[in-house]
Image (spheres, grey):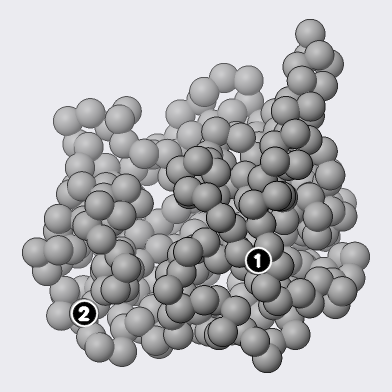
């Protein structure tokens, strides 16, 4: 039965790949510069501004070799920003984001075409992946460790970073500078794991639970996701990115030994200042209470829960990320 299920999803994934590839066009093609073993980063967005340059500089500093950007309907095309960069390839996608599974059908196309046999990070502009020992070691070293341990997926917990006060987050330079200079606090506790069965786990809590879901913690959004994977041609995201098939790639609890886990920082107060970021979009991405709190210029900081982020050591200390057997 498991074999038939695997064949079925590979069949579905193939025809989705064929269909959604027809809706995509290449704008900047530097994929010939990709070498086997390079660390790639795939991002999808419809709002590209100058902060994406810092976004790229950050990931270059931790060892990303090539960027694959999907631009869907941006007023300022991503291709204009990266016209002279030889480590960036840009693709445009037609059709609605919702119809494309929040963009994951487009991601499947690009991953299958260009990321096979490479380790690829999945982070959209405004999301910063922090791995254990990020200041001393490159992401390629962690990718090689995972491969040697026969662990092809890297899991991460989504964290919302915010400012000590709302005025700091609404500084006019907040969009173009290092976002950690403006929003360097996060919830250090209030997270919990839930076993979903079959080796799959979910992580809930954090800012979303603190502001929106205290009466019903189970209804708070899942914070964990796959943030990196050694891609193969038969892998495929389903259910708007919540499921990565084959299903064994999602089995976090079945892995032997301590598991390496990362964190993904987001910045709702800075995102709210984007010209195209409507309140509806803020609600969809961050939740009603977070969006309303930001809109009313109220602080997200909470004494005793919020702590300052300075380095990956702060996340290791809280237990949000884990170095596992990677010492």
Q: Nearer the viewer, residue 295 or 80?
A: 80
Q: Residue at x 40, y 87 (%)?
A: 177
Which of the 4 image quarters holds residue 4? top right
Residue 268, given in percent of the width and then of the height, sits at 30, 64
- State whether residue 327 appears in this view: no
On screen, residue 133 above or below 53: above
Check the image and name the residue furthest to the right. 36
Residue pointed to by mark 1: 91
Q: Residue at x 50, y 41 (%)?
A: 99
Residue 103, given in percent of the width and then of the height, sits at 55, 50
Q: Nearer the viewer, residue 202 or 56?
A: 56
In the picture provided, is 308 more to the left or to the right than 199?
left
Sequence-wise first label, 2 or 1? 1
Residues under numbered marks 2 and 1 in contact, where contact means CB atoms less than 8 Å apart: no
Label 1 residue SS: strand
Residue 170, numbered label: 2
| Crowd around label 2: few <14 · some 14–19 · many ≥20 (10 Å) | some
Q: Residue at x 31, y 73 (%)?
A: 274
Screen quadrant of the C terminus: bottom right
| Crowd around label 1: few <14 · some 14–19 · many ≥20 (10 Å) | many
Q: Residue at x 66, y 80 (%)?
A: 60
């Amino acid at each position: 039965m498991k074999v038939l299920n695997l064949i079925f999803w590979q069949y579905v994934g193939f025809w989705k790949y064929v269909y959604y590839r027809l809706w995509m066009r290449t704008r900047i093609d530097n994929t010939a510069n990709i070498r086997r073993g390079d660390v790639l980063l795939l991002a999808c967005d419809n709002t590209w501004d100058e902060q994406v340059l810092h976004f790229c500089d950050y990931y270059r500093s931790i060892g990303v070799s090539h960027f694959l950007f999907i631009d869907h309907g941006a007023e300022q095309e991503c291709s204009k920003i990266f016209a002279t960069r030889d480590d960036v390839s840009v693709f445009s996608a037609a059709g609605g984001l919702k119809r494309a599974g929040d963009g994951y059908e487009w991601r499947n196309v690009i991953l299958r075409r260009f990321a096979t046999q490479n380790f690829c990070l999945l982070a959209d502009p405004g999301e910063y992946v922090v791995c254990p020992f990020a200041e001393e070691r490159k992401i390629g070293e962690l990718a090689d460790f995972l491969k040697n341990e026969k662990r092809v997926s890297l899991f991460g917990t989504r964290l919302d970073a915010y400012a000590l006060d709302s005025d700091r987050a609404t500084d006019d330079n907040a969009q173009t500078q290092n976002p950690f200079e403006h929003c360097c606090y996060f919830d250090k506790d209030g997270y919990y794991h839930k076993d979903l069965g079959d080796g799959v786990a979910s992580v809930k809590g954090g800012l979303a639970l603190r502001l929106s879901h205290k009466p019903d913690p189970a209804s708070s959004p899942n914070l964990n996701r796959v943030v990196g994977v050694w891609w193969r041609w038969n892998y495929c995201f389903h259910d708007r990115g919540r499921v990565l098939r084959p299903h064994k790639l999602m089995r976090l609890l079945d892995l032997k030994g301590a598991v390496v886990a990362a964190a993904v920082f987001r910045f709702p107060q800075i995102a709210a200042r984007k010209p195209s970021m409507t309140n509806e979009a803020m609600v969809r991405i961050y939740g009603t209470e977070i969006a309303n709190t930001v809109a009313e210029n109220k602080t997200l900081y909470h004494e005793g829960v919020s702590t300052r982020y300075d380095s990956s050591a702060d996340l290791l200390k809280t237990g949000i990320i884990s170095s596992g057997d990677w010492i």
